[in-house]
């Protein structure tokens, strides 16, 4: 997760599959780590892990406002798209990973 104001990575979470359990765990860890004092908005694409029934409930419990990009519009999520492009260019593409 990235703080769009500071552009700092707030939290990283990894799993074999991107499901709502991973996303909920990551959001909880980020909120507990940062302890926000003001409003928090969580912006994402429309992936299944964000549209599941459990994730909006978690956002509500943590007092986090949800925001989603328009369907098929990567420009709504440009900062995140750029981060992953750089991550792949600088790290992922230069290593071999066991499968």
Image (cartoon, grey):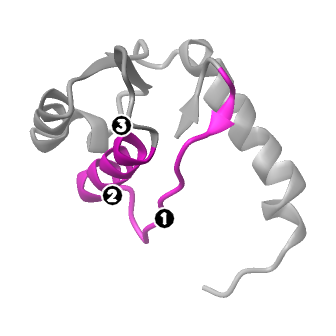
Residue 36, by quadrant, is top left
Q: CA distance from mark 2 to mark 1?
A: 7 Å
Dividing the image into 4 quarters, which one contains the C terminus? bottom right
Q: Is residue 56 left or right of residue 97?
A: left
Query: What residue is drawn where x is 48% and y is 19%?
Result: 72
Q: Is residue 30 left or right of residue 24?
A: right
Residue identifier under label 3: 47
Residue identifier under label 1: 14
Q: Please tell me which residue lies in front, 55 or 81.
A: 55
- Magenta stretch encompasses residue 13: yes
Q: Please tell me which residue lies in front, 33 or 76.
A: 33
Q: Position of residue 47 (x, y in %)?
A: 35, 37
Tell whether label 1 touches label 3 (CB within 8 Å). Answer: no
Residue identifier under label 2: 22
Up the image or down, 22 lies above or below 57; here it is below
Q: Position of residue 63 (x, y in %)?
A: 20, 25
Q: CA distance from mark 3 to mark 2?
A: 13 Å
Question: Which is nearer the N-term, disc 2 or disc 1?
Answer: 1
The residue range painted magenta reads 6-33
Q: CA distance from mark 3 to mark 1?
A: 16 Å
Tell whether label 1 touches label 2 (CB within 8 Å). Answer: yes
Q: Position of residue 77 (x, y in %)?
A: 56, 20
Query: What residue is drawn where x is 45% and y is 39%?
Result: 34
Q: Residues within 10 Å of mark 3 (few under 14, many from 20)?
A: few
């Amino acid at each position: 997760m990235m703080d769009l104001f500071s552009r700092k990575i707030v939290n990283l979470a990894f799993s074999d599959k991107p499901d709502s359990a991973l996303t909920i765990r990551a959001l909880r860890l980020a909120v507990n780590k940062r302890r926000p004092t003001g409003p928090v908005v969580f912006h994402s694409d429309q992936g299944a892990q964000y549209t599941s029934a459990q994730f909006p409930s978690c956002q509500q419990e943590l007092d986090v406002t949800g925001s989603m990009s328009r369907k098929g519009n990567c420009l709504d999520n440009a900062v995140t798209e750029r981060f992953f492009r750089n991550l792949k260019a600088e790290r992922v593409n230069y290593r071999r990973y066991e499968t």
